[in-house]
């Protein structure tokens, strides 16, 4: 049984044509199902949990990265398969999963290639792609084993589960998080010097001498330090395309 959740942006009339073509294609493929159009007045949590109670096993998100991130965080603890039909401009997750835009994604849903992939978790919040932290005087305790203190320069920390970062695809099947640290040091009358470090960990504890904001890139949501980040292996069943990055 397929359940389709439409992003609130799709209520705009400019999307009427593409959603009509998608619905026709889904019917042709025999995978049409119940449609619920999200709005700012509808509680996504309540809608999803009601459908799960009714026995829904496959949830298809029609929309962009932000809605995908919200749904994944809500259903991660249930035995649900997720699929994507990307519409709009912010569709990095679909690209990484090898899912084409619009009605072409219907064929990927129909082919039903399912991978059981890892999720990241920061405190009590799941994420699919990555976290971004900017600043200095940040400490990372890695795998309860060693400590990295970032006290100098401007640092960008990218903690990735499913991502394409610094020309390097990350693997959401390896039970590890990829940690990229770019350090930029500027000196008077000299060109800024940039260094990049890359390593893998299963757990990270993040602290700072001040509260540091951490961006959950899936949902453009901010959490603050201190924070604990872990990988949760094989947590999510998701439909992927042949052109996926892993």
Image (cartoon, rainbow, N blue to C red):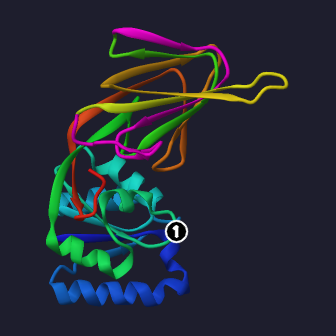
Count of numbered tags: 1
Which range is magenta? 145-174
State which quadrant residue 199 falls in. Answer: top left
Residue 17 is left or right of residue 151, and the answer is: left
State which quadrant residue 117 falls in. Answer: top left
Residue drawn at (30%, 40%) of the image? 119
Q: Is residue 56 visible?
A: yes
Q: Is residue 43 visible?
A: no
* 227 falls in the magenta region: no
* Image location of residue 198, percent across then percent down: 42, 28
Residue 212 is left or right of residue 237, and the answer is: right
* Image location of residue 112, percent across then percent down: 15, 67
> What is the quadrant of the N terminus in the image?
bottom left
Residue 230 is left or right of residue 111, and the answer is: right
Residue drawn at (23%, 72%) of the image? 108
* Image location of residue 95, percent across then percent down: 38, 61
Q: Secondary structure at mark 1?
A: loop
* Image location of residue 102, percent across then percent down: 38, 78
Compared with residue 14, is residue 101 higher up or lower down, i.e. above or below?
Answer: above
Name the residue tied to disc 1. 89
* 157 falls in the magenta region: yes
State which quadrant residue 135 falls in. Answer: top right
Residue drawn at (47%, 88%) of the image? 16
Assess disc 1: are there few (<14), some (14-19) or many (≥20) residues with their C-alpha within 10 Å of its C-alpha.
few
Front position in the image: 184 or 112: 184
Residue drawn at (53%, 65%) of the image? 40
Q: Residue furthest front?
A: 190
Front position in the image: 200 or 238: 200
Compared with residue 230, is residue 7 higher up or lower down, i.e. above or below?
Answer: below
């Amino acid at each position: 049984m397929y359940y389709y959740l439409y992003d609130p942006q799709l209520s705009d009339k400019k999307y009427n044509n593409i959603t009509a073509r998608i619905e026709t294609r889904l019917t042709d493929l025999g995978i049409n199902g119940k449609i619920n159009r999200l709005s700012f007045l509808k509680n996504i949590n309540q809608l999803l949990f009601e459908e799960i109670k009714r026995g829904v096993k496959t949830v298809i998100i029609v929309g962009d990265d932000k809605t995908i991130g919200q749904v994944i965080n809500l259903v991660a603890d249930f035995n649900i398969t997720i699929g994507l039909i990307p519409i709009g401009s912010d569709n990095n997750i679909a690209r990484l999963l090898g899912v084409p835009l619009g009605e072409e994604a219907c064929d990927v849903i129909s082919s039903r290639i399912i991978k059981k992939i890892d999720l990241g978790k920061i405190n009590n919040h799941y994420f699919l792609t990555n976290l971004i932290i900017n600043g200095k005087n940040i400490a990372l305790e890695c795998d309860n084993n060693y400590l990295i203190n970032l006290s100098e320069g401007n640092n960008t920390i990218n903690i990735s589960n499913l991502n394409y970062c610094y020309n390097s695809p990350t693997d959401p099947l390896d039970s590890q998080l990829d940690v990229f640290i770019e350090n930029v040091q500027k000196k008077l009358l000299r060109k800024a010097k940039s260094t990049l470090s890359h390593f893998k960990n299963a757990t990270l504890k993040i602290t700072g001498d001040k509260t540091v904001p951490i961006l959950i890139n899936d949902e453009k949501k901010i959490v603050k330090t201190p924070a604990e980040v872990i990988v949760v292996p094989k947590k999510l069943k998701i439909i992927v395309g042949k052109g996926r990055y892993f």
